[in-house]
Image: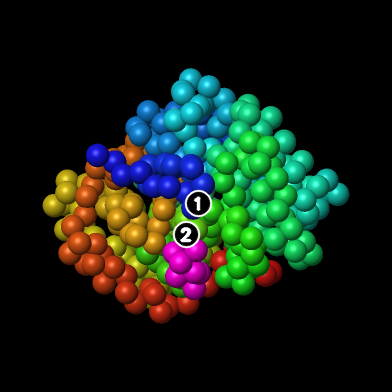
Amino acid sequence: MTKTVKIGKSDVTSTPLGLGTNAVGGYNLFPNLNDDDGLNIVKTGIENGITLLDTAYVYGLGHSEELVGQAIKDFDRHQLVIATKGAHDFSTGEQVIRNDPKFITQQVENSLKRLGTDYIDIYYLHFPDHDTPKAEAVGALQRLREQGKIRAIGVSNFSLDQIKEANADGYVDVVEDEFSLLHQDHGADMLPYLKENNISFVPYFPLASGLLTGKYQRDTTFPDDDIRSQIADFQEPRYGQILTAVDAIRPIAEVHDATVAQTVLAWYIKNPLISVVIPGAKKPEQVAANAKALDVKLSDAEFKQIDAAFEAFKEMKSGKSLRDPD
Ligand code: NAP
């Protein structure tokens, strides 16, 4: 039976595998996306047992939310967990991050309209701003919770100190931040605090944008205009170290008749520090395959074996994260 996880102190529950939808309508983030694929990605996920859909205003400046809203019309809304985020203001023509109550309250109303729903299960402050006291921003979300417009409160890309400030009144249910087998320095400082305070953790970039699916080889090369040719993970010697660690997963995957990606996702699902893992996808086939991770039950020994293969990455600085200042 698939386990169910509870989101913080709220009454929101989910399966431990969600779907990241930044490539569903996120035309400002990825080239060559089309709406039909986006709709199919979401529908395929739901048909394969995924309940939590992670979107945000900034993914396509509302378009990802619109597509998610369209896709869920064919399903029972109450079985689904819709998570979205806001903080980006482009009204001046430039990107400004805002957490002030007036702005955030309006963002929630806008998201409700785009999603075509009368409640949002999890609403995250997507990034912290410089000015708004964190507890004040979260207080605005608490009022929206009291009005039944949102069910759980999240923060994303907040430092540990900012999370503590945001949670001054105990209202924060969930934190979303970068964390993966490869990037264990990101997020690691906050995990004990979250556990102690009954705050769920949702890691993003769990497949390290595809590197942890096992699809890359030592001789894979990328053209200069491909973003991967600039990313630290794809530069030697780190790239070779990553592929060696990924190779250690292959025999475990074989035992379970699973792919490397499914086995990696099963590691997050078994990890007691992680609540819901939200891999993204560019194709419906990827979602269908990833959803099978719910059936891969790793033993304690296999969990530790994977952990050990990536031990070195706990100490390794993995470069800039989205929450580092520019
Ligand atoms: P990810 O989950 O690490 O990687 C997803 C990518 O891996 C896919 O787009 C696909 O890309 C590849 N992939 C997925 N399944 C695969 C499979 N079975 N076989 C082969 N390749 C596969 O990264 P992400 O999608 O960028 O991040 C996950 C989610 O986290 C996002 O969708 C978003 O919802 C959330 N997120 C949140 C924040 C935040 O600030 N809170 C920031 C970033 C992301 P290719 O086919 O192109 O290789």
> Relative to 142, is 286 above or below?
above
Query: 4 and 310: which one is in front?
Result: 4
Q: Is residue 179 magenta?
A: no
Q: What element does badge 2 sit on?
A: loop
Image side of residue 147 versus residue 259, left or right:
right
Nearer-N-terminus badge (2/1): 1
Return the residue found at the far right.
92
Q: Residue at x 46, y 40 (%)?
A: 52
| Residue bearing mark 1 | 9
Type of amino acid at the residue the image marks with label 2: Asn
> Relative to 129, is 215 above or below?
above
Image side of residue 79 versus residue 321, left or right:
left
| Residue bearing mark 2 | 198
Label the magenta part by its dominant secondary structure: helix
Q: CA distance from mark 2 to mark 1?
A: 7 Å
User: What count of labels does the image hold?
Assistant: 2
